[in-house]
Structure formats: structure tokens, C-alpha cells
Amino acid sequence: MMRVLLLYPYPNHRRMMETFSLLLRNADIYNDVICVRDFNWIHNSDIPVIKVFEKLSHLQNNFRPYRYRDKYVSLFNNKIMKLLFSLYDKVDIHAFRAENLFWAKVCHEWNIKYDITLWGSEVLRATDQEIKDVEWGYEGAKSIRSIDKMTNRLSNIFNHKYDYKMFNTYFGNTNYDIIDKISFKQADILANNLGIKIPGKLIVTCGYNGHPQQQHDIMIEVLKKLPSHIKGRINVVVPMTYGLNESYYQEIKKKLDNIDINHIILKKFLKPEELAALRITSDIVINTQTTDAFCSALQDHLYCKNVVIIADWLDYPEYDNNNVFYIKTSKEDLYNNILYSIEHYEELKEKTQSNKEKLKKLTSWSNVLPAWVEAMKS
């Protein structure tokens, strides 16, 4: 029996990690999962004392008297976590950046076995030098896992030094089950409640979060140039339900208010059913972000047979190799591709009909899990 402790930084990915944890347990990899940002836990191990560690982790924010809190946090980081790590065969560090750089260094210094699972920006949005600066982590890791575009970049930067311990792994999509349970009628009701559904108008969804890296301004500038009669046929939806700072929101809102198109910015965090409704009811989706690993948001939109327009600086061999239909565009051709997609929507929609089955085969948990099990047991 193997026991693994998984550490991940982003609370909004809890549902995906819950599914992942349960599937690992079913594959005889007993595990517990901690979000290192809020110290919420997921339990799928048989370690009797684990609840004690969970309570100790929650004390960090509630420790009283408050003047001793820093001392307790230091005790927790340097003693309690070391004891916790020792209960597992290894620690699996998800997203090798921010808080998890600290825990990787802790494992490195304490001689605790650990793996690194890359999530995207720590490689795709980093310079070669920034990646080399944390080589100590890759050198000490027992295995390094991610999709091939990230492992390939590491391989080139480190001159194939760590290829022997690299594994290509993909997360399964946790949203398909929810999407499949919602009827079109239910999706329309939810979309109406969110304010994104306007009778007679195509829903054009721009990006999928509030980070500036989504480059909303590129999409907005192109939409602004559309002819008036085309503008009247669409409702622009800009999801900014996570990763948003207020100054960026105000900047994008000001630009949207000047394009003479019906639009709405979604700021409120969406429930899974609301998120599914957004995917189902979107007609055209535009993605011009700076980099992307293999995000579930685009998978959802393709699964829902939306007409998806993706910038050509984003490389998706997974889609190309499986003949998934989408429109690849340069920045210069974005206007023409958006205009064509609106004017020929029904024709393009027909070409998306096989995407659902292709995405299910490509990104369902049942298909991707064996690679994870092999990598974890290596």
C-alpha cells in the first residue's frame, strides 16, 4: 500500500482534487490532500491521527493570544509539518510556485521524498533563468509530471538531464458529469438568472477568468470594430469569477462600456451548475490568453460544442492530433474570424458536433488515470 500527501495552492480547484483523490484511493494509492493556501483537507488515507494534524493546521489563523501566532506558525512549519510528512511514502507537490516552493524546499532540506506536478504558469510563464533558479527542486524530485509541452520545455532547458524521471500526465475533466446532467431548458433558466441570455442574440464568451493574462483588451478592441448590424446580434459575456483585482476590472469595464454592444461581466463566483450553464449556452468562445497548459474551461466549451476561436500562439497538439474542431487565428485575422463565426454560426456549429465524444475520450478520468498511477508508483 502506498500513502501520498498531495499539496496544491488554489482553493477553486478543490472539486477536481476531491475527484482525483478518490480515484487514487480506488487505485490503492491512499492519500490526503491539503490546499496550502487555506489548509482545507481532503481525507482518503487510513492514518488514524490525521484529524489531529488538520486541527493543528487550522490553528494557524485562529491562534490566541495573537501575539504568539508567529511562533506557532513557525512551530507548525518546522516541526508539525515535518512529522506529518513522515507519515507518507512521499509528498506530491502540485504547482511548483508560490507557497509550494516553500514546501518543496522543506522536503528537500529534510530529505523527504517528493514529486513535482506542474500546473502551467510555473513553466509556461517563466523565463529560462527563472526555471533554472529552482533547478534544486527538479533535481531533488523523484518524478516530474505534466503535459508534454511543459516537460519538453524543461527537457530543453536542462539539456535532457531529468528526462528519466519525467512523466506525461493529464488531469481528467471533472465538469462533464455536471454538464451532462443539465438539460438545455435548465441551462437557459440558469443563464437567464445570470443575465447572460438575451433572446435572439448569440452569446460570445471572452476568456474564462479575471487575470490580465487573459488579454481581454485584444478581444474588446476587435469587437468594437464590428459593423453595427453584427453588434446587434451578439451579447458579450466576460467571466471574471476568479483571479480578479478591482483595478483590472475597472479597466475592462470602461473599455466594454465604449463598444456599443450588449455585455455583462460575471464577477460572482459561480456554482458548478451555473458554470455548466455558461458553457452550455455560450455560442462563440474567444481565447487570446498569453499561455495555457490545457485548461478545463476550454475543454468544457469544446465538449459543449461551442464554436471556439483560439489564438495561434497557443499550442494545443492534444486537440490537433485528435481532429477536434476549433478555429485557430492570428491576432491580425481575429476580426475576420469573429465576423465569419457570427455570420456563419450555424455552418460552423455543425462542424463542432463530433467534439463532445473526442473530448470525452481525450480528457475523461478513466482514460488519464493509469498514467498518474504509473507515475506515482515509480
Image (spheres, grey):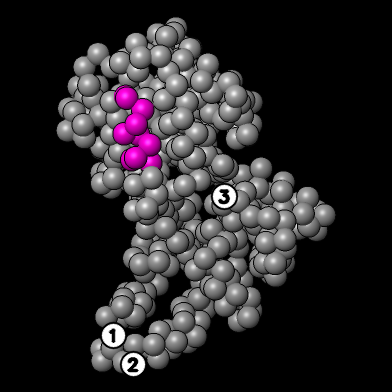
> Which label number is shown at residue 68?
2
Residue 376 colored magenta? no
Q: Is the residue under label 2 in contact with that under label 1 (CB below 8 Å)? A: yes
* Sequence order check, earlier mark of 1 and 3: 1
Compute the Cα span from label 1 to label 2: 8 Å
Query: Residue at horizontal 17%, vertical 33%?
Result: 193
Check disc 3 and give the amino acid type: Gly
Q: Residues within 10 Å of mark 1 (few under 14, many from 20)?
A: some
| Quarter holding residue 41 | bottom left
Query: Residue at horizontal 40%, vertical 91%?
Result: 71
- In percent of width and height, residue 43 lies at 36, 63
- Tag 2, which secondary structure? helix
Residue 258 colored magenta? yes
Check disc 1 and give the amino acid type: Phe
Compute the Cα span from label 3 to label 2: 37 Å
Query: Residue at horizontal 77%, vertical 54%?
Result: 157
- Tag 3, which secondary structure? loop
Query: Residue at horizontal 31%, vertical 34%?
Result: 257
> Which label number is shown at residue 63?
1
